[in-house]
Image (cartoon, rainbow, N blue to C red):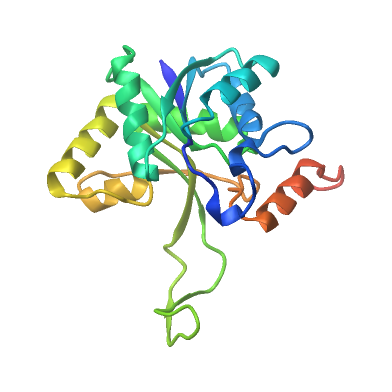
């Protein structure tokens, strides 16, 4: 079975708005619902779980009913960090009876333009290799700075990958990683892929992502999202 685990435990402080960013509306629909519908429409997704900011669970369930998100099966409580929220989600799935060999597509609630192709590729690559990380090659020149204001060092971009979500694992593998992290005192890794890298010994395979698979973190991101949602590819483009 293939399950989507949507991480929506953040309060969205960087957005600076009155409600969490995942519940802000774009085209009369909450961002998180746009995200849920991407998985709802995919034929190979068998169920959806959401790790939700505490106090918003009833709102989420109401939105799911309003927008006919029939695959939403479980809502788990969010943690104090992204890593803790993922922990709550994967252990929640196990407690609900999901099997170790089931695939879990861990995805940010605020990446609503996820394509069906990316979901399909994550499932296929994870089934074949055991791990699938969505990412795109870095095109920009990269500089390293200690203070954010000055720099004397560049980083070659040829081998750099900008990661996105979904990041897909067998349930038993991601749980084992979190158990090992607890033993080693790793408490706040930025993402599941960085956790795997910190633990070592796990070869992750890259699924081609998309510049449209934007993560909404700032007001500027929200403006870009709205523009992307109302843009169509010109017919003359190959």
In the rendered view, would you say 77 is above or below 182? above
- Side of 231 relative to 99 (left or right): right
Give the farthest residue toward the left: 183
What residue is shown at x 34% (from left), y 13% (from top)?
A: 96
Residue 17 visible in rendering? yes
In the rendered view, would you say 43 is above or below 12? above
What residue is shown at x 66% (from left), y 31% (from top)?
A: 34
Percent x, y of residue 215? 58, 48
Percent x, y of residue 43? 57, 16
Observer-nearest of 12 and 234: 12
Percent x, y of residue 26? 74, 38
Residue 71 occupies quadrant = top right
Observer-nearest of 203 and 84: 84
Residue 128 visible in rendering? no
What residue is shown at x 53% (from left), y 73% (from top)?
A: 141
Observer-nearest of 125 and 141: 141
């Amino acid at each position: 079975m293939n399950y989507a685990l949507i991480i929506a435990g953040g309060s969205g402080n960087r957005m600076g708005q009155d409600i969490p960013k995942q519940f802000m509306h774009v085209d009369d629909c909450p961002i998180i619902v746009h995200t849920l519908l991407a998985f709802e429409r995919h034929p190979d997704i068998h169920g959806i779980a959401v790790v939700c900011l505490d106090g918003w669970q009833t709102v989420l369930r109401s939105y799911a009913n309003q927008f006919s998100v029939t695959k939403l099966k479980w809502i788990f409580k969010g943690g104090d960090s992204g890593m803790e929220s993922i922990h709550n989600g994967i252990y929640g799935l196990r407690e609900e009876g999901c099997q170790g060999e089931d695939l879990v597509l861990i995805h940010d609630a605020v990446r609503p333009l996820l394509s069906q192709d990316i979901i399909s590729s994550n499932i296929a690559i994870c089934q074949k290799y055991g791990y699938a990380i969505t990412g795109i090659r870095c095109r920009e020149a990269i500089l390293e700075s200690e203070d954010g204001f000055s720099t004397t060092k560049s980083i070659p971009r040829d081998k750099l990958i900008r990661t996105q979500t979904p990041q897909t694992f067998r349930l038993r593998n991601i749980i084992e990683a979190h158990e090992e992290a607890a033993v080693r005192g790793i408490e706040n890794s930025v993402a599941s892929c960085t956790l795997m890298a910190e633990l070592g010994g796990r070869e992750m395979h890259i699924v081609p992502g998309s510049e449209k698979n934007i993560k909404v973190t700032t007001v500027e991101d929200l403006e870009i999202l709205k523009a992307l949602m109302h843009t169509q590819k010109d017919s003359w483009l190959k």
